[in-house]
Image (cartoon, rainbow, N blue to C red):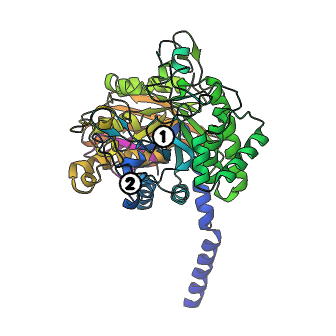
């Protein structure tokens, strides 16, 4: 009898093992079950120089040693610092599934003088050479490693593209040739031409993106590349690009080629594009074609590294574009649709005002209405804080929990600006203007301050829930009840269906919620905020927690 029992149990075990999915199959199924969609992504935007210093040996380059105004010089942050946080799981714990870095290309070597001290190109928007990484930020090997590590954790990488202008002219950085740039007039911003065919600010040479004139390489680049021993290689690559594309050797196409190289060489997933409205709209349609071609080439050459079938992602900074504009940005004398064969998404400058003036439901239902209708198939990138918005939603950082709720639970793509999740100060003693927004990441507070840790935990819970459920950003919003405030989000893509129920501003202690519109009786649910399992009985669930928020998902 004992022998029979042993044989019977062994057979059961063998059958169970035989029928159990292989580990790789389980991972594949999980990947298919939860698709990544840019319209519902949770993007972390960081200033490369200010986020985390992973290599102190690259803190000073090109004799950038002038005394600077407060927070106007390089502080040491670099790509290795980002790598450290990817390895540590910082982004994963925060529910981040894409990282956007400020430009990492080589910056002007000199400094500008603003009267209170020098300013260097620490922010990355003052390009000297699009084909090189600035050593202050790191090396090509660092970039390659960062992207590989991010992709291994399911995190996409966006770089920042600047086509509109070069860096300022300094004693170390001569102006580019006249056929490449204009140095005036200054933009008046009162019309289309007064916004496009002009310089943004004094001493910021404007690239002649409208020109189809064939131009030679700027002499300073020729001299630089020869000194670095790569002139022949760069010229050969340019020749191949222009021969294959048939595009003219005009200023904008040189720059597009150089930016496309970061796609074909490293497999980046998208670009955030700077100063979009200051360039002719057709330029962005051309840029999209160049990027799509480069991304297709990278996928063909690296089939084992392809994450999914998503196209290359382009999100544009059309300054003062609001979601209420839907597809039309109005210059006063001309309206432009930047979604037309160009951008997947535009940065939404309106949400900070909506968050300050509207209730959760008014804001969520408004965004749902626009995104599911006029902007169907496109998206907006929502933010409450950024590197150059001097009037953010919560400048004093007095409402970090509300900020998380309104940003991470709003329909659309979310942009977490570094330090939003830890209430990094946006007012710095001695700093002027946008320098206040660009302080060093407050790692010490995250490590030692219980209040900061509690704020971070809230952002982590909401961010993780959002990352697990594309329905939150990309799904259809439906209010279940006004008081208590409960709503659902529903998302369908092919055979994939995702539905969640969320409650906000709820009482502490016992909460009884009507979920009959979303979940069937007997359904076993996971309440992700307090991490407890509940069952639907008579169309309701009972949750006992000290939290005032409920995040319900199918178990």
Instruction: Classify 184 as above or below 416.
Output: above
- Picture coordinates of residue 408, whole percent (x, y): 41, 38
The quadrant the N terminus occupies is bottom right
- Picture coordinates of residue 175, whole percent (x, y): 52, 34
Residue drawn at 47 percent across, 22 percent down? 322
Instruction: Classify 81 as above or below 388.
Output: below
Q: Comparing marks 1 and 2, which lies closer to the viewer?
A: 1
Q: Which residues are magenta?
A: 531-555
Q: Left or right of 267: which side holds 364?
A: left
Q: Assign the magenta stretch its main secondary structure.
A: strand
Q: Residues within 10 Å of mark 1 (few under 14, many from 20)?
A: some
| First-in-chain label (1 vs 2) | 2
Residue farthest to the top, as pictured:
333
Q: Which mark is residue 173?
A: 1
Residue at image mark 2: 60
- Picture coordinates of residue 302, whole percent (x, y): 69, 56
As for residue 200 lying within the magenta part, the answer is no
- Picture coordinates of residue 524, whole percent (x, y): 45, 50
Q: Left or right of 219: which side holds 457?
A: left
């Amino acid at each position: 009898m004992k022998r029979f029992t042993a044989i019977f149990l062994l057979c059961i075990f063998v059958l169970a093992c035989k029928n159990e999915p292989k580990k790789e199959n389980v991972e594949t199924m999980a990947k298919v079950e939860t698709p990544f969609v840019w319209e519902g992504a949770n993007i972390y935007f960081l200033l490369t120089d200010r986020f985390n210093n992973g290599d102190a040996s690259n803190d000073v380059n090109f004799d950038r040693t002038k005394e600077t105004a407060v927070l106007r010089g390089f502080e040491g942050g670099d790509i290795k610092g980002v790598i450290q946080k990817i390895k540590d799981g910082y982004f994963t714990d925060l529910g981040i599934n894409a990282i956007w870095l400020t430009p990492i290309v080589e910056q002007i070597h000199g400094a500008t003088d603003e009267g209170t001290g020098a300013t260097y190109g620490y922010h990355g928007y003052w390009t000297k050479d699009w084909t090189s990484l600035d050593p202050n930020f790191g090396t090509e090997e660092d970039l390659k490693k960062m992207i590989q590590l991010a992709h291994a954790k399911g995190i996409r990488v966006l770089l920042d593209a600047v086509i509109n202008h070069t860096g300022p002219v300094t004693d170390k950085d001569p102006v580019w040739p006249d056929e490449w740039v204009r140095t005036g007039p200054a933009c008046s911003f009162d019309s289309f031409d007064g916004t496009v065919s002009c310089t943004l600010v004094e001493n910021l040479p404007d690239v002649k993106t409208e020109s189809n004139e064939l131009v030679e390489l700027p002499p300073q680049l020729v001299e630089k590349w020869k000194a670095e021993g790569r002139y022949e290689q760069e010229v050969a690559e340019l020749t191949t690009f222009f021969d294959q594309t048939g595009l003219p050797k005009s200023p904008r196409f040189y720059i597009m080629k150089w930016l496309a190289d970061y796609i074909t060489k490293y497999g980046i997933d998208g670009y955030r594009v700077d100063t979009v409205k200051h360039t002719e709209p057709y330029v962005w349609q051309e840029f999209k074609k160049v990027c799509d071609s480069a991304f297709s080439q990278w996928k063909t050459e690296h089939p084992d590294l392809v994450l999914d079938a998503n196209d290359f992602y382009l999100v544009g900074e059309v300054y003062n574009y609001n979601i209420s504009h839907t597809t039309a940005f109005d210059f006063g004398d001309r309206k432009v649709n930047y979604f037309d064969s160009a951008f997947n998404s535009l940065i939404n400058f309106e949400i900070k005002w909506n968050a300050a003036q509207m209730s959760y439901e008014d804001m969520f239902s408004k965004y749902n209405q626009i995104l599911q209708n006029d902007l169907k198939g496109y998206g907006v990138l929502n933010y409450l804080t950024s590197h150059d918005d001097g009037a953010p939603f919560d400048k004093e950082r007095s409402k970090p929990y509300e900020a998380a709720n309104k940003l991470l639970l709003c329909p659309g793509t979310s942009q977490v600006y570094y330090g939003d999740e830890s209430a990094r100060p946006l007012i710095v003693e001695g700093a002027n203007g946008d320098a206040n927004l660009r302080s060093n990441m407050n790692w010490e507070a995250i490590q030692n301050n219980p209040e900061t840790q509690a704020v971070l935990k809230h952002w982590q819970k909401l961010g993780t829930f959002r990352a697990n459920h594309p329905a939150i950003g990309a799904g259809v919003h439906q209010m279940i009840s006004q008081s208590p405030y409960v709503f659902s989000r529903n998302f369908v893509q092919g055979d994939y269906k995702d539905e969640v129920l969320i409650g906000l501003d709820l009482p502490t202690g016992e909460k009884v919620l009507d979920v009959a519109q979303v979940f069937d009786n007997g359904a076993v649910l996971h309440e992700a905020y307090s991490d407890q399992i509940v069952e639907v009985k008579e169309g309701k669930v009972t949750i006992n927690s000290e939290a005032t928020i409920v995040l319900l998902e199918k178990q």
